[in-house]
Amino acid sequence: MSNLEQTLSIIKPDAVERNLENEIKEMFKHKGFSIIKEKKIQIEKSEAERFYKVHETKPFYNDLCAYLSSGPIVVMVLEKDNAVSGNRELMGATNPNDAAEGTIRKKFGISIDKNSVHGSDSIENAKIEINFFFKD
Ligand code: IDP
Ligand code: MG
């Protein structure tokens, strides 16, 4: 049975800055994801703070929000069967040092903070995050 889902993906500033946008998109397409919406934007720090609100008590929250708003990002809605878990798998572990071979973070991540991509962690959060960037 098919279980079509959508998830939110962000190509973070470190990857956009290194011109990795197309290579990362190719990895998504190769795994069968359709990119059904996308835009390249730069967000205000206050928007990053809203987006990452779940992390507001973490010691890295301020740096994380400063970083996400530090340069252009590419925000995408990805669609395929089981897209949420499939994207997490393709991204790899949060720390690129722990990420499996063949994952985006293994291939392109620089450090735990400059780890090249964001992906929603649940179906519920995917809906919230898609609506955050693409309300229409
Ligand atoms: P995720 O991006 O794999 O879902 P989260 O735990 O949701 O990881 O953390 C959000 C982002 O915060 C990570 O992608 C990473 O950039 C940053 N981050 C997480 N843990 C740390 C840390 O211990 N130090 C610095 N940055 C961190
Ligand atoms: Mg997360």
Image (cartoon, rainbow, N blue to C red):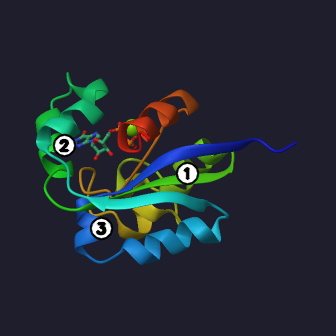
| Label 3 crowd (10 A; few <14 / some 14-19 / many >=20) | many
136 lies left or right of 82: left
Marking on residue 61: none
Dot placed on the residue nearer the N-terminal end, 2 or 1:
2
Q: Disc 3 to disc 1, how far (Cα)?
A: 17 Å
Residue, disc 2 = 64
Q: Which residue is mark 3?
A: 15
Tell me how far mark 3 sits from mark 2, CA to CA: 15 Å
Q: Dot 2: within a 10 Å radius of its alpha carbon, few (fewer than 14), some, or many (20 or more) residues?
A: many
Q: Is residue 7 above or below residue 126?
A: below
Q: Nearer the viewer, residue 8 or 99?
A: 8
Is 3 situated above or below 17? above
Q: Are marks 3 and 2 in contact (CB under 8 Å)?
A: no
Q: Which residue type does callout 3 highlight?
A: Ala
The reply to whether the residue tagged 3 has its Cβ within 8 angstroms of ligand 1 is no
Q: Secondary structure at mark 2?
A: helix
Instruction: Tell me what residue is drawn at x 31 percent, y 25 percent.
Output: 54
Give the residue pinned by disc 1: 87
